[in-house]
Amino acid sequence: MAETNYDSVFGKMAVEQGLCTDAELRRALEELKSRRRISPVMLETLLVSLGYITQSQALRLKASLKDNKAAVHQIPGYKILGKLGSGAMAIVYKARQLSLNRQVAIKVLPKRFSENPEYVERFYKEGQAAGKLNHPNIVQAIDVGEAAGYHYFVMEYVEGRTLADDLAGGQPMDERQALDIIIQVAHALAHAHHHGLIHRDVKPKNIMLSKTGAVKLADMGLAREMTDVKLAETEAGKAYGTPYYIAPEQIRGKIDIDGRADIYGLGATFYHMVTGRVPFMADDSAEVMKKHLKEPLTPPDHINTSLSAGISEVIEIMLAKRREDRYSNVEELLVDLEALKNGQPPLQAHKRFDVSMLHELSTGEEVEIERPTYADEETIAKYRMAILILGGASAVFLIIIALLLILSF
């Protein structure tokens, strides 16, 4: 039994740290069943023999497991019940807080990272950022501290699963369910932004779905205060975030990141939910990020043609490459999300579309209209005619004529 539990934890960590894929782990576990009928064998040995991980990777994983097993029993006031998951920099355990007799989650920083002041500082910043927030759609922070050389962060335990678990099969989610989840996360972001914090890593893995139906935004590991100029300057030129969901300005390492970066991440998550795939795919992270910067987005309703009118338009505005073309803030986005929920058109998205057109007219940029957005073909033709006729006129004259055309519709 102990051997099976060790294999389960080892395999989960190998996948979570990107050393092997889910498919490779499944194949290895099937092979493990067959081989154990003949002789005892450990999963770590099998993964190495199959070429899924290297011997050195197996040794590091094994050492990390041993290290963190010792760490969690050093935290006073808590009884460890099991492992919940792991990431590149920490392992999360399910525990019982003895003083209040309640279940909690404890994130532990491994010993090898505890010796680096930068990692320790970032770890405490996560706890402090989460501690500033108190919202039903955000995982609540409880405590941060250090015991026997190990740094830990105690937080609310959410019984359920992550949104990433639901999307693992590659199938589109029911749009009403997707909309409900996105609205709850948007409320969480609005609360964080109101308190001056940008999440910077909005993605399915950081969205918890509880058994009671509540949606919780988790992991403030990359959160940054909008007014923290010193931290922003130290991060200049570095891309912080997850490649599949990262905003273009984060890729460029801009220091003036604001809430619109979170809107982009939420838009990429929304896209994934209703299409069953991420907005941009490539063989490696660098190529994915290049596509975020330069490749035109395939509208979600071109992939899932059953989407209701308006959802695709809202997602496209959320995923605009220029942040000026996105929703100005989450409150503006919520107006459209609530409208969609009530079967109404997203008027804020309409305004964004019109403003974008006027911007392109006034700057002389080429205007590409891939498909009508709540406008019929005659309307689109009028826009195109205005562009052709007025190509050499002044910027002010262009704007006036374009406005008259819009009003005449």
Image (cartoon, rainbow, N blue to C red):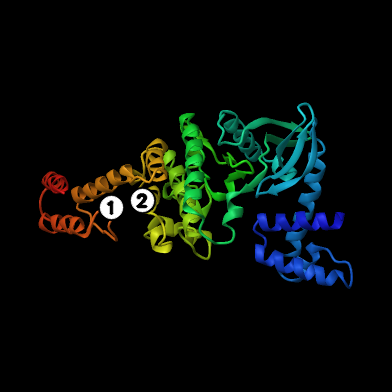
Q: Residue at x 21, y 57 (%)?
A: 380
Q: Residue at x 73, y 44 (%)?
A: 110
Vertical arrangement, residue 142 with respect to residue 356, above or below = above
Q: Residue at x 76, y 50 (%)?
A: 64
Left or right position of 313 against 200: left
Question: Can you name the residue that lies furthest to the top here?
Answer: 99
Count of labels shown? 2
**Residue at label 1?**
374
Residue 136 image position (x, y, % from top left)? 57, 33
Q: In the drawing, does residue 299 fall left or right of residue 18?
A: left
Amino acid at pointer 1: Tyr
Left or right position of 208 against 191: right
What numbered label is drawn on residue 310?
2
Quarter of the image with the N terminus in it = bottom right
Query: Could you tell me residue 141's position as x and y percent?
Result: 63, 32
- In-front residue for pair 153/142: 142
Residues under numbered marks 2 and 1 in contact, where contact means CB atoms less than 8 Å apart: yes
What kind of element bears circle 2? loop
- Above or below, 402 against 124 in this view is below
